[in-house]
Amino acid sequence: MSPRAWKRIGLGLLLAGAVALPFLVSNYRVFQFNMVLVYAIVLLGLNILTGYNGQISLGHGAFYAIGAYVAAILMEHFGWPYWATLPVAGLVCFVFGFLFGLPALRLRGHYLALATFALAVAMPQILKYKHIEQWTGGVQGIVILKPEPPFGLKITPDQWLYLFTLAILVLMFAIGWNLLRGRVGRALVAIRDHPVAAEAMGVHGALYKTLAFGVSALFTGVAGALGAVVVQFVAPDSFAAGLSINFLIGIVIGGVASISGAVYGALFIQFVPNFADEISKAAPWAIYGVFLLAFVYLMPGGVAGFVRLAWGRLAGARGKTKP
Amino acid sequence: MRNQWLWAFGLAVAIACAPSVFAQKKYGPGASDTEIKLGQTMPYSGPASAYGAIGKAELAYFQMINDQGGINGRKVNLISLDDAYSPPRAVEQVRKLVEEDQVLALFQNLGTPSNSAVHKYVNAKKVPHLFIATGATKWGDPANFPWTIGFQPSYQIESHIYAKYILKNKPAAKIAVLYQNDDYGKDYLKGLKDGLGDKVGLIVAEASYEVTDPTVDSQIVTLKSSGADVMFTIATPKFAAQSIRKVSDIGWKPLHFINNVASSVGAVLTPAGLDKSTGLITALYLKDPLDTKWDKDAGMQRWHAFMKKYMPEANVTDFNYVYGYGAAQLMAIVLKACGDDLTRENLMKQAANVKNVALDVTLPGITYDTGPNDYFPVEQLQLARFDGQRWVLFGEVLAK
Amino acid sequence: MEAFLHQVFSGLATGGIYASLALALVMIYQSTNHINFAQGEMAMFSTYLAWSMINGGMPYWWAFLLTVLVSFVVGIVIERIIIRPVEDAPLLSVVTVFVALLVIFNSVAGWIFTYTIKTFPSPFPEQPPFGNRYISSHELGSIGITLVVLVALYLFFRFTPLGLAMRAAAQNPVSSRLAGIRVGWMLALGWGLAAAVGAVAGLLIAPVVYLEPNMMSGVLLYAFAAALVGGIDNPFGAVLGGFMVGVLENLIGAYVIGTELKLTVALVLIVGVLLFKPSGMFGKVFVSRV
């Protein structure tokens, strides 16, 4: 069978496994894996911007927060159902992302990093602002009700929410895959690696870069809305600056400029802190730091790069060449 | 014939009464003949990590209880997890405690955001959410959230007391307020405003700060320039120390109140400068470990002995250790009152039935009382003035 | 008027704090072309080392000297052992390593020294100079020391062969190697010096903000902003940027928007400056030719 067929089978098995997962583990684990799915969508979004398009963002926590609050406000103040808030969250974040991408055109490297980080740092303070308190709930935040499974399905709300998130994830990944594998993806990469040459070849750099910001924010906003529904609570403290750093770490560990890397990265940022906590109660974050170093040294291309390498070796060992 | 029926009837009654005769043990999740499992989330890392000392004190306290034989013969196992002061992480850890570790109850979860995030969940799951470590006023709501109960005097009760003092002793005051821009600071500020009632116009200036601000010097300067002669510092230890120091350095001499959480002589006043702290007023409900007045006090002697044996490396001037000890002691008292009925329902019942309990570390005259409709365990404080060495209590024990 | 002066001086004092850490950031950038996010935590850790020494009875200036030396050595060691494997790695991997260092230093400091705040002594007298109420002796003295370090750095990079070699190694490692410069050791030296400058910053900052593991987290962002606004490759710019950010932040909070949005507005302004001057106010403008 061709490697592509193998890949398809593998993907199918993975999906089947993912669907079966909530029924095999306890509710608490379902919650954790649900967060993994949410983070995976964020990381895919971040990868579009930072991995494929080379615009470093230390501020995606801000878009995540916006998406979360859009969902919370719609559900709490306007009584919208949870699933209807996702497209709105995505759209609002697309607009914000696009608008932020415009001035970002003028900034490169460290300067862009600072500007995006400034956004992430300012977000909690903006959310606490007293004049919008009646919408955002101010420092007390907003509590969100857990959605019940529809059509009277005999599954727990946690399981339903997980499957719903999984469906959204598959949808977002399909969109992302389509975008990145085609002309748009190539344009983004071209702009990242050889911006002048790309312009010369007719790739409208400014448009693609701001669109990349917008699309990236859209993905993150949708994930933020999902995250809010899963955690059932939003508050300014949930979106501190460290969240954005966490997302960046996620794509580096998972694999920059890789779609599967988003899932690996999400698994890392969700589970490794817990694991570190079990190893050392005294200085768990130090252990986490050691893990970070280990992953960066041993897997410079991220887990996705490592997997690709391993897969290639395996395929090569059997005498087949990689496609 | 009648005798037989009488016999049968008597036997039936005897059999029915047998359970109560033998005082059968009843266990909820996390409780057994040998162990009682409790859970909590604490900010051991992140911006509020200074409060992690409270969790450490409580772990040590239960270690001491276990060494003394446990509670009704059972060892208390307190599982204390880090939530980094992040609500999503708090949700995750609390779900772990409830669903995986199957604890009997949650105890002293710290932080308003972390507790807000799990408030609905624990009440839906009917898990006792006891003596939580936050002074927000919203926890005293037995009608809607019968499983959640606080521990310390609420921030609003405390600021009401300050407001009443001002209205009585300085009715023409011009008040300036420095507050931390989060639920903690804002709740205090609200209490102050409510306590002043229609005299809320006495507040002439407010300034907030974020925990990421390096100093509050700019805010102090702004507040001074408002011409205020009364100053409220509602802050966490580091910023309270900065505030006290700066107020003194710029030559401002207002009547300066600091809130209870920031009143520790060791953690706040000494770094600020004891001479600069003279004249400060606060409201206390716990004994100050530095106050030699309590040298002969049995309760504080027990506390000192506990610190020496179980936390020898700790800084005994840090109020957090007094607070943690007190909360753990209250929990132990409630657990003991459960006897052999260690179900969640009974535990909640006992927690809502605390009558006139004086802890080792509470001031004389201040007691813990709860009832099915009263989920504010302690509503009294006493004002104290700093004389350069220690807090000197004055006036009587005040209630809201 | 008095209040305004207070705000300005208070801003200069805070700005001095930002400037001192910004110098360390500029130092590391000029010698490695990277911005080390862990600089603040390393400085904090150095300050704890000093605190331990002083607590153990060592006089202040000996502790100061020893701390700076130890930090210098530790900086070199970190570069050789931890940064070396990723010297040629993409930027994001390097950033991840910096983040790892950040959390490690922060967590270990919290573990060893606990999170309760500690006082840290100042070498300057308690009384403010000339009895003024605007600025303390420590704040003035800190600014002085920062300026001295600034001049020293400038002279070092501009006029010494070693400084030149370090700048070359950072900007063009390949050509530098061909010219006989031992690039690896230049980078290590850069790290050592940055760690030393950071240690000085920490020792100056701690008496003001009180010593605790999270003491630098707020400062780092502003120092970062100051360094970039001033031009990341220009120590004068960084120091000026620090003062500007400090004063601006105070004036905004006092007169423009109130304290509840002070941080946001300050950041917006900083980003605004960058939009007009994308390489910072005094930074070199890069022109890329096709």
Image (tube, grey):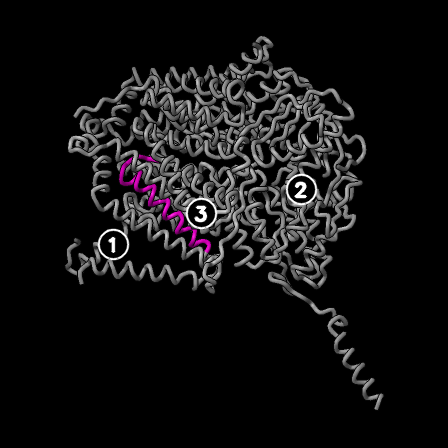
C187 horizontally vs B108: left or right: left
Mark 3 and 2 residues: CB-CB less than 8 Å, in contact? no
Say which quarter of the image contains residue B232: top right
Mark 1 — residue? Answer: A310
Please state the chain letter of the residue tagged with numbered disc 2 in the rendered image.
B
Residue B316 vs residue B153, the one in the foreground: B153
The vertical placement of B256 against B105, above or below, is above
Check residue C248 in the rendering and tell me which mark sits there, or answer none.
none
Q: Is residue C105 magenta?
A: no
Mark 2 — residue? Answer: B323
Q: Check disc 3 and give the amino acid type.
A: Gly
Q: Is residue A51 magenta?
A: yes
Where is residue A38 drawn, in percent x and y?
A: 40, 49
For the residues marked 3 and 2, what is the alpha-carbon distance in whole angstroms?
35 Å
Q: Which stretch did the figure color magenta?
A: A31-57
Where is residue B79 drawn, in percent x and y?
A: 57, 53
Q: Let me know if marks 3 and 1 both belong to one chain.
A: yes
Where is residue B36 drawn, in percent x and y?
A: 63, 59
Mark 3 — residue? Answer: A227
10 Å neighbourhood of mark 3: few (<14), some, or many (≥20)?
Answer: many
Q: Let me know if marks 1 and 2 both belong to one chain.
A: no
Mark 1 and 2 residues: CB-CB less than 8 Å, in contact? no
> Can residue A293 be seen?
no
Label 3: element kind: helix
C134 horizontally vs A18: left or right: right
Quadrant, the N terminus of chain B: bottom right
Where is residue C286 drawn, in percent x and y?
A: 25, 22
Magenta: main secondary structure = helix
Label 2: element kind: helix
